[in-house]
Image (tube, grey):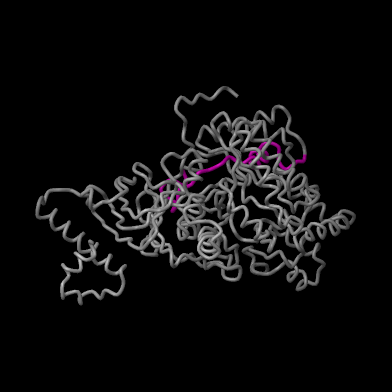
Amino acid sequence: MVLDGCATIMGPQDSVMPIRTDRDMRRWCRALLAAVAVAALWIGDLRSQPAADLLLVGGLVHDGSGQPPARQDVAVAGGRISFVGDAAAAGLDAAVVVDVDGLMVTPGFIDMHSHAELTEDYGRDALPFLHQGITTVAIGVDGGGTPDIAELFAGLEGRIGVNAFAYAGHGEIRERVIGSDDRAPTAAELNEMRALVRQAMDEGAFGLSTGLFYVPGYYATTGEVIALARVAAAFDGIYDTHDRDLGASYRGVGYLSSIREAIRIGEEAGTRVIFSHFNAQGAANYGRAPDGARLIEEARARGVEVAAAQHVYTATQSSLAAYAIPRWASNGGREEMLERFRDPETVRRLDVETMEMLAIRGGADKLLFADPRPELNGRTLAAVATEWELPVPAAVRRILTAGNAAVMNLDLYDIENTRYLARQSWMMTCTDGRTPSPAQNVTHPRVFGAFTRKLRQFVLDERIVTMPFAIRSMTGLAADFLHLDDRGYLREGAVADIAVFDPDRIRDRATYDRPRQVSEGTVHVLVNGRFAIRDGAATGALAGRPIRRPTRTGEIVPDL
């Protein structure tokens, strides 16, 4: 055995480096053999150049396919993976050799639904994401993405810590063309909206995102969304949706009807479909995840490419207006909403309907503010109303008069639903996390821990899914869905987005009380071949890039 041979070479001088375990022995031997190899190369040919920039030696490689891992070496050259296998047997050398014996090597994780604030100075480094092993994030989700993709990407180039791909937002486009009015677009307006989708796709968007739960997307008919999604489909685009009713919408269409609508949009438009943060909301839907999953399975069986993403927390985060103000009261935009707040008869109606909306979500004590305003941050809506000596609906209107507020809804998801969905072959992973501003002491912990929490809780502690299966949900499965041929896998030629973990230490540290704690166990992270995290510490590198939608060979987009 190599270990025995190494021990023989060490002889009685092994006291220079105490050897207590087999792992210590393997690390010592690899270091010795690497030194011998380097010496031999130096002696043999002083003019030779290393074949790779970096060599990760001896790690347990999960390649993103979902297959069992293997102990292999991974080399990087020119920002891409140049070798996966036995480097010693291949005679491969590198400028930098990093021993990752006992560690787990994976493709960089792909966050399929994020609110990473990459255009803000406080969010450009993306450190909460990198410390989870995330190297690529989706932006422009929930219908909020700009169609001006070229301008967006120009501002991100060379200035971000992670890679980013973007969707064009239906809500942003609708508001730009017809405002926040509850009406259908005219034929001319619909054509203008379609032109903006086309512009975004031409400039590299991956598809169309909607937030049909939110204003103004809420006001759109299914037909309107299909018409816009058809434009994305002509570019091999995706339909990404925060669907209309996850189960906790006020006087909504219902959990299952909402799923059917999203599938119909993709099926009739000809797009792939991904459900954002897919789960059933509200106590009335505890245990109903299999019902929703069945609709996805039926669609997939008839050839519709439908998938979803999840995080494993039981709380959501959105806005106070979305959770506490009925949509009719937002018709026409913010100024008209505030005018309604001043009308006594309308206020009486809002008093009733706001409380009905909150009851669906568990009451005012289940809404925890993640807002920068110090009088709100980290406090429940119930506590704020009590301090102000106001009824809850009046407190809601007072807050919204000053501006909309970020709020978490605690215990809205059923953990058993979440466990069930984690086992599905089409379930990817997301943070749904918004980078907090410096003023936000309390925010949703998912931005700091969603991926590591899934690995810790569902793989290592509860053993609900295997490690290869979970890693695939974060890597290869996402890359396949996005039609990204050069990311999501550890294979030769792929972009060197790589994460290295200590499996014994993988842990999310962020909590609802103390969310600003980065995850543990992430040893190294490479983004486009550069270390963003090394030995657990951020390097300061801004190695991320905007990723434009890949064009398919022979792609010809018809006139629209």
Rendered view: 21 above or below 399: below
Near-viewer residue (540 or 258):
258
The picture places residue 111, in percent across and down from the top left corner, at 52, 51
Q: Is residue 61 left or right of residue 448?
A: left
In the rendered image, residue 255, in percent from the top left (x then y), is placed at 73, 48
Q: Residue furthest front?
A: 1
- Left or right of 171? Residue 200 is left
Q: In the displayed orientation, state which residue is furthest to the right.
A: 345
Expressed as whole percent of the image width and height from the top left, the position of residue 355 reads 82, 60
- On whether residue 169 falls in the magenta region, the answer is yes
Please tell me whether residue 427 belongs to the stretch shown in magenta: no
| Nearest to the observer: residue 416 or residue 204 | 416
Q: Is residue 208 visible?
A: no
Decide if residue 323 is in sight here. yes
Q: Which residues are magenta?
A: 154-182
Q: How many numbered discs?
A: 0
- Compared across the picture, whether 358 is left or right of 499 comes to right
